Amino acid sequence: MNNIDDQIRDAEEEASLLMGFSKALTSASTCNDNHVKLMALDENLKLWVGIESSLKSAKNLLPQEIKENLLKLSKYVERLTISKGVDMSKTDFDCLANINMQISEGLLAVVRNSLAKEEAFSLLKCAIDLSNAHESKNSGDLINALDNNLQLWVYIKTLAKNKSTALPEETKSNLIKLADYVSSKTLEVGKNLDKVDNGTIESFINANLQISEGLITSQKIA
């Protein structure tokens, strides 16, 4: 999960900076002070140079097509800023500001979509591991499967409780309830592994499969 967390955190930070510099560029476009214009342009340029470096990193999980488009935009921002500087028109400033706003929204959407796919895969894997461990009647495998599943649901609950998570409130509430159910039932199972309730394990598996399918379906619709 750490790699995904880093991706989301980085995307949110970049999106926040892009929105902030978009406002600064909009303000500078109607300002008569060249120093203010220069500061807005310089900070915006530094941000795009940083984004370009991030896009070239092997750790960046964005799709290749999106990386290429962002790199082209980065080059455009660099050329326009360096060639015109404080002499650029209000239209040029507004163009840079609009690019920032659109990319800010796009970055968050792409990374959150990637997160949904990763969660769907993790839920499916945990469901398979639980099923295999229960069928094999191997206590060690079952403990590992239950522990991994519990950690995943704790993570999902944390996301659902986060105000910035882009999900309907009813969906968040249902995920939190499911996470609490998984937590309480996992503790019960852990206390008596010799007499595991088949219904409880099946309920874990079904919950994972249903939420995984829901995440995948929502991405197809989007």
Image (spheres, rainbow, N blue to C red):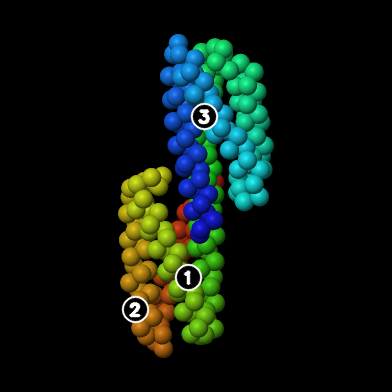
Q: Earlier in the sequence, mark 2 or mark 1?
A: 1
* Looking at the image, residue 73 lies above or below residue 119: above
Q: Position of residue 83 (x, y in %)?
A: 64, 18
Work out whether residue 221 can be spotted: no
Instruction: Tell me the distance, in whole angstroms, between the alpha carbons under discs 2 and 1.
Output: 16 Å
Foreground: disc 3 or disc 1 = 3
Camera-side residue: 49 or 3?
49
Q: Locate residue 84: give its quadrant.
A: top right
Camera-side residue: 24 or 98?
24
* Looking at the image, residue 73 lies above or below residue 11: above
> What amino acid type is highlighted by mark number 3?
Glu
> What amino acid type is highlighted by mark number 1?
Asn
At horizontal 36% and vertical 50% (from top left) the residue drawn is 162
Q: Position of residue 121 (x, y in %)?
A: 55, 60
Q: Earlier in the sequence, mark 2 or mark 3?
A: 3
How busy is the neighbourhood of tag 1: few (under 14 within 10 Å), some, or many (20 plus)?
Answer: some
> What amino acid type is highlighted by mark number 2?
Glu
Q: Which mark is residue 43?
A: 3
Q: Residue furthest bottom?
A: 194
Location of mark 2 (residue):
188
Q: Secondary structure at mark 3?
A: helix
Location of mark 1 (residue):
148
Q: Locate residue 206: give its quadrant.
A: bottom left
